[in-house]
Image: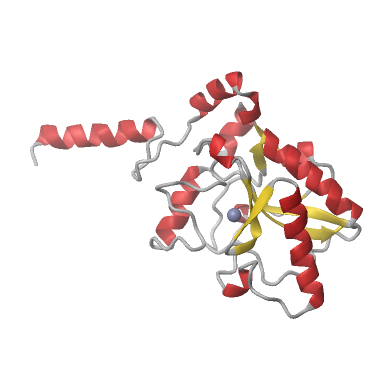
Amino acid sequence: MAMHVKLLLTFILISCCVQGQSPYGLHATTMTEYKASIKNHPEKELVELKNVIPGIVLDIRYATKNNFTKAKVYNLARAYARKPVAEALKKAQADFNQLGYGIKIYDAYRPYSATIKFFEMMKGDTTYVASPYKGSKHNRGCALDMTLVDLETKEELIMPTEYDSPVKESWPSTPVDDPMIRKNRDTLISVMEKNGFRVYEAEWWHFDFIGWDKFEVMNIDFEELEKK
Ligand SMILES: [Zn+2]
């Protein structure tokens, strides 16, 4: 390949990355674009769930090695979501509190770079990770991975599987024999669906905000959000 062609390809690759274009052809919002977008659309702001929802418990697994990658993916343990998502979750928290439960978050907004990493680790199998060609609803600040805790003890309620288990028992449609586990899972799903979310068909812990398509995929890391 001629040197000037190589230089041109290198230039295209670098400018794609700088402008937020991924090698999968998806444009992910950069910090500069995000700042401009929230001026006209304040509902697009990413807010920290702990500032909006009293008593919410965080266990951000990708900021630890306790996740399916066995590696620390995030440098900071943060749970951000778009403003209307956080407001809907606040209503769900009030409903759960009435039942003696509280929300524990495993993951919320996830930078697009993490979605690429998961996809490449799973060698393209998208049953349990999102495709970087479309991006994840987590990348839009519109999905939550979560469970319930006892309001008093903060102990997790028993659910059909551990978080991120790639097994059929994780599917909300899989029957559960144990009445307590069935009640816990069904309570989580029914209260979330009443408050504007939809459970993902392969994961009892994953909820998409209805209206997610109005929000773009973003590639802004937690350190950048902290600086804003
Ligand atoms: Zn999820």
Displayed-image quarter of ligand 1: bottom right
Horizontal arrangement in the rendering, residue 62 relative to residue 118 (left or right): right
The spot of residue 154 in percent (x, y) is: 84, 59
Q: Of residues 117 and 25, which is closer to you in this image?
A: 25
Q: Quadrant of residue 211?
A: top right
Res 4 visible: yes
User: Looking at the figure, which quarter contains the C terminus?
Assistant: top right
Q: Is residue 153 above or below residue 34?
A: below
Horizontal relation, residue 136 to residue 18: left or right = right
Whole-percent x, y for residue 138 in the image: 57, 46
Front-most of residues 216 and 80:
216
Quarter assignment of residue 85:
top right
With respect to residue 27, does 61 lie above or below? below
The colour scheme of the drawn protein is secondary structure
Residue ranking furthest to the bottom? 177
Q: Is residue 130 left or right of residue 95?
A: left
User: Can the viewer see residue 58 in this picture?
Assistant: no
Image position of 23 with respect to 161: above or below: above
